[in-house]
Image (spheres, rainbow, N blue to C red):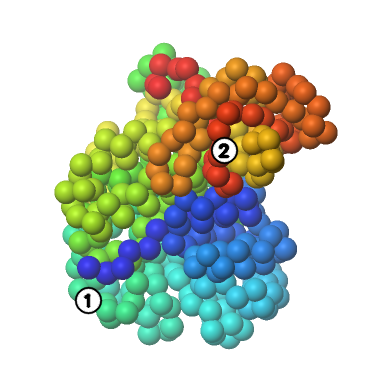
């Protein structure tokens, strides 16, 4: 069996450190230019440099996305950007555009190149094409089945790596190559500015009756005909690993530290359990499912891995996420009295029960006994976003742990 990498997205330096803390083998981040998440909280240059140093000090790799479909006006800026990245020393660049690929090979040949899923790599000859040009890895098109991936693995060089998405949001368009956003709003998905029109609500208009919107109703709220369920392959690790996939990729460069902590910790535990034995992995399936369900999620699908998805892969009656837990913060410091310092992300108050996500996969349930603000003055609650708060929960909590609060809702 090939060594399996767990690859996690990071929207900021804080999220990168969270991914490392909970067991990522590698993280992928976007700079402030030339990645496909223009709306994401992309990582400033100084944080990228610190993040690479931090990850490397913990034995974790860092990949930088530069996977836009470039226009002529982008090329000079890309050259300058790659000169900067060369000095930072990431482990790989994620690229889809052949021109950008050529610039990367010219300016920083010592950095590995991974071919983005945007490149639509769906057969072994395409993989070999990129390998012959110097790529070390291809991110599989999301439309490939496990059977196809297994066949590709047999046909490509043993030292060429396959990366595949195993969890997160799915795109309605082939390997993310969508024109809807550009058509409706002028913001191109392949330039990193997608407005996600696949999540919008649609009606039918009869051509001789302009302005008359006819609802296509699944429920009284309408229908969302392009709205895909989220991918989740936590139940199918044996099939993924037997197909020869080298890197299991989590989608989500716009996600919070809470999401990254939950998904990283769960997939880390599942991979490690499987490496002990398949029986160990299967005995813990209920735990994996329960922990994944604590993320902010839609519903789940296995995508194309087992063949063409049917109508059950879409969500027709809503476009919202299910949110079962609220992100409170990360343990940043513990003082001599045992008070915990967090930069608060959502309001909490004295008397509330919180859940601490420990590194080993377990959760500690604590109650807020006392609180102080950043000036160490007693307070009853923390109502202001990103407020510095010290609180006592009667337990010593390890640094780096994510704290969350369960919400009372029907889906919980």
- The answer to whether any part of residue 37 appears in the image is no
Extreme-top residue of the structure: 220
Q: In this view of the protein, which residue sits in the foreground, 74 or 204?
A: 74
Quadrant containing the N terminus in the rendered view: bottom left
Please report the residue visible at 40 percent of the width from the left and 39 percent of the height from the top.
362
Q: Which mark is residue 155?
A: 1
Q: Which mark is residue 396?
A: 2
Please report the residue visible at 51 percent of the width from the left and 35 percent of the height from the top.
356
Q: Tags 2 and 1 in contact by the CB under 8 Å rule?
A: no
Q: In this view of the protein, which residue sits in the foreground, 253 or 222?
A: 253
- Cα–Cα gap, marks 2 and 1: 53 Å
Residue 149 x %, y %: 25, 63
- The answer to whether any part of residue 365 appears in the image is yes
Please report the residue visible at 27 percent of the width from the left and 73 percent of the height from the top.
124
Q: Which mark is residue 104?
A: none
Looking at marks 2 and 1 on the same chain, the residue that comes earlier in the sequence is marked by 1
Q: Is residue 124 above or below residue 17?
A: below
The answer to which image quadrant residue 70 occupies is bottom right
Question: Tag 1, which secondary structure?
Answer: helix
Few, some or many C-alpha atoms within 10 Å of disc 1 (few <14, some 14-19, many ≥20)? some
Q: Is residue 70 above or below residue 223?
A: below
Question: Tag 2, which secondary structure?
Answer: loop
């Amino acid at each position: 069996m090939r060594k399996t990498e767990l690859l996690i997205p990071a929207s900021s330096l804080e999220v990168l450190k969270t991914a490392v803390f909970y067991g990522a083998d590698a993280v992928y981040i976007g700079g402030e230019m030339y990645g496909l998440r223009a709306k994401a909280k992309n990582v400033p240059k100084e944080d990228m440099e610190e993040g690479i140093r931090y990850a490397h000090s913990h034995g974790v790799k860092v990949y930088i996305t530069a996977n836009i479909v470039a226009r002529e006006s982008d090329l000079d800026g890309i050259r300058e950007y790659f000169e900067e990245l060369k000095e930072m020393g990431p482990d790989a660049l994620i690229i889809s555009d052949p021109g950008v690929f050529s610039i990367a090979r010219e300016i920083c040949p010592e950095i590995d190149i991974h071919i983005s899923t945007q490149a639509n790599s769906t057969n072994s000859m395409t993989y070999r094409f990129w390998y012959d040009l110097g790529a070390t890895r291809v991110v599989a098109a999301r439309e490939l089945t496990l059977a196809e991936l297994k066949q590709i693995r047999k046909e490509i060089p043993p030292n060429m790596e396959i990366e595949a998405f195993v969890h997160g949001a799915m795109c309605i368009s082939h390997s993310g190559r969508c024109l809807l956003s550009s058509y409706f709003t002028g913001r191109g998905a392949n330039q990193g500015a997608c407005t996600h029109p696949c999540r919008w609500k649609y009606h039918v208009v009869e051509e001789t009756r302009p302005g008359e919107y006819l609802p296509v109703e699944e429920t009284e709220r309408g229908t969302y005909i392009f709205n895909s369920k989220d991918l989740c392959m936590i139940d199918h690790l044996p099939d993924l690993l037997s197909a020869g996939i080298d890197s299991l990729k989590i989608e989500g460069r716009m996600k919070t530290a809470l999401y990254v902590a939950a998904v990283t910790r769960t997939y880390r535990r599942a991979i490690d359990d499987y490496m002990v034995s398949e029986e160990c992995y299967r005995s813990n399936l209920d735990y994996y499912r329960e922990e994944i369900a604590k993320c902010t999620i839609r519903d789940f699908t296995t995508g194309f891995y087992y063949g063409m998805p049917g109508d059950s892969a879409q969500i027709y009656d809503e476009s919202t996420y299910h949110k079962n837990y609220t992100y409170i913060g990360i343990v940043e410091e513990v003082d001599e009295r045992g008070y915990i310092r967090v930069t608060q992300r959502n309001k909490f108050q004295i008397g509330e029960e919180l859940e601490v996500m420990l590194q080993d996969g377990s959760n500690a349930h604590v109650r807020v006994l006392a609180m102080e603000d950043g000036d160490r003055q007693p307070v009853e609650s923390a109502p202001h976003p990103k407020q510095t708060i010290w609180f006592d929960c009667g337990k010593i909590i390890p640094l780096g742990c994510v704290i969350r609060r369960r919400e009372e809702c029907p889906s919980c």
